[in-house]
């Protein structure tokens, strides 16, 4: 069992040293998955080929590629999208947090990306733009949305506006969770499985839905959108892998937040960490 002082010291230690070996602090499941599934994932996927094919044709034609990034956070994906569309394109990133908006704007300036515009925007209250500044009613070629719907208390205000934000033949790409119950440490990870269940309780208590992707395809189809591709992106890793290191750190850090919320106890946190230490030395153990 850890005292409040010990928990504070452990949190400060994580804050100072969290890293995945490439200079990024991996304390968020969303940042980790963006890094793992996009920036560092070079496996061929059919949807990537489709997107790259469209991008290549647009580059040859000289047309402007216009992208809308919903729930941009501090701008990780927006910056990457801005680089991909190039100076002749345009990316409009929408984000509710004033702090994140300031951070994303600063990165855009530092990296000389005038094609990236960041606006403060509430997806549940503010109407979506129907096009970029150069063509306010022309729609966007691509609308990108990652780990946003799972935090929304209601989906309809956003989903109902998406068709109007797309240009004819535009593409909508969403990435959300659909089976959080799979979060586990194998074998014998009973405390970790319980931790995953409590994490879901915390998301739902805040009005979100950790398995929101079970609803999204049907809701989108009802708005007249054609579902072109559905893909699963599992995160699995054995001891010492990037996936395992992130998930263990997530337990260590998010457990403190669950304790503060009254959903998790220091005794449960201690048992979970003992379980991680024990299984880490067992050959063949893995995280999902």
Image (cartoon, rainbow, N blue to C red):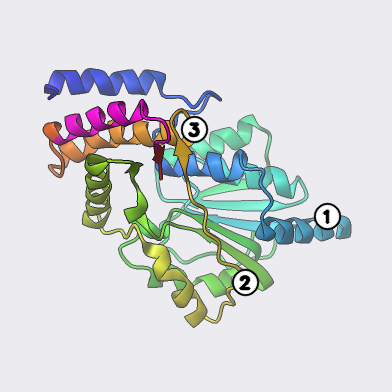
Mark seen at residue 267: none
Task: Measure the alpha-carbon separation of dots 3 and 1.
Answer: 35 Å
**What residue did someone put label 1 on?**
59
Q: Earlier in the sequence, mark 3 or mark 2?
A: 2
Q: Position of residue 15 (x, y in %)?
A: 35, 23
Question: As drawn, is 104 to the left or to the right of 151?
Answer: right
- Label 3 crowd (10 A; few <14 / some 14-19 / many >=20): some
- Would residue 75 be counted in the magenta stretch? no
Q: Is residue 4 above or below residue 95?
A: above
Mark seen at residue 228: 2
Magenta span: chief secondary structure? helix
Q: Position of residue 90 (x, y in %)?
A: 68, 52
Q: Earlier in the sequence, mark 1 or mark 2?
A: 1
**What residue did someone put label 3 on?**
242
Query: Quick check: can you spot residue 139?
Result: no
Q: Quick check: marks 3 and 1 in contact, CB under 8 Å?
A: no
- Label 2 crowd (10 A; few <14 / some 14-19 / many >=20): few
| Local secondary structure at mark 1 | helix
Residue range highlighted in magenta: 268-285
Question: As drawn, is 193 to the left or to the right of 122?
Answer: left
Q: Position of residue 157 (x, y in %)?
A: 40, 70
Task: Measure the alpha-carbon separation of dots 1 and 2.
Answer: 23 Å
Depth check, front residue: 256 or 184: 184
Residue 8 location, quadrant: top left
- Residue at image position (54%, 39%) is 35
Q: Earlier in the sequence, mark 3 or mark 1?
A: 1
Task: Measure the alpha-carbon separation of dots 3 and 2.
Answer: 31 Å
Q: Position of residue 95 (x, y in %)?
A: 46, 50
Q: Is residue 24 above or below residue 215?
A: above
Q: Quick check: marks 3 and 2 in contact, CB under 8 Å?
A: no
Image quadrant occupied by the N terminus:
top left
Query: Quick check: can you spot residue 159?
Result: yes
């Amino acid at each position: 069992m850890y005292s409040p002082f010990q928990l504070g010291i452990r949190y400060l230690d994580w804050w100072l040293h969290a890293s995945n070996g490439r200079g990024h602090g991996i304390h968020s499941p969303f940042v980790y998955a963006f890094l793992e599934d996009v920036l560092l994932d070079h496996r061929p996927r059919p949807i990537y080929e489709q997107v790259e094919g469209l991008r290549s044709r647009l580059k040859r034609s000289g047309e402007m590629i216009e992208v809308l990034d919903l729930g941009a956070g501090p701008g990780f994906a927006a910056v990457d999208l801005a680089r991909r569309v190039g100076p002749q394109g345009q990316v409009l990133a929408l984000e509710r947090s004033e702090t994140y908006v300031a951070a994303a704007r600063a990165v855009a300036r530092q990296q000389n990306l005038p094609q990236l515009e960041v606006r403060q925007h509430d997806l549940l209250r503010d109407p979506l733009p129907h096009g970029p500044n150069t063509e306010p009613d022309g729609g966007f070629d691509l609308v990108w949305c990652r780990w946003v719907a799972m935090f929304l208390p209601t989906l309809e205000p956003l989903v109902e506006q998406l068709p109007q934000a797309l240009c004819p033949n535009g593409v909508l790409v969403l990435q959300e969770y659909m089976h959080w119950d799979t979060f586990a440490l194998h074998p014998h990870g009973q405390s970790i499985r319980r931790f995953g269940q409590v994490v879901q309780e915390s998301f739902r208590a805040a009005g979100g839905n950790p398995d929101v992707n079970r609803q999204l395809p049907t809701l989108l189809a009802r708005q007249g959108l054609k579902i072109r591709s559905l893909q699963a992106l599992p995160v699995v890793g054995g001891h010492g892998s990037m996936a395992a290191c992130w998930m263990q750190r997530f337990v260590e850090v998010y457990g403190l937040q669950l304790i503060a919320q009254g959903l998790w106890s220091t005794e449960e946190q201690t048992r979970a960490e003992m379980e991680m230490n024990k299984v880490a030395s067992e050959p063949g153990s893995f995280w999902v």
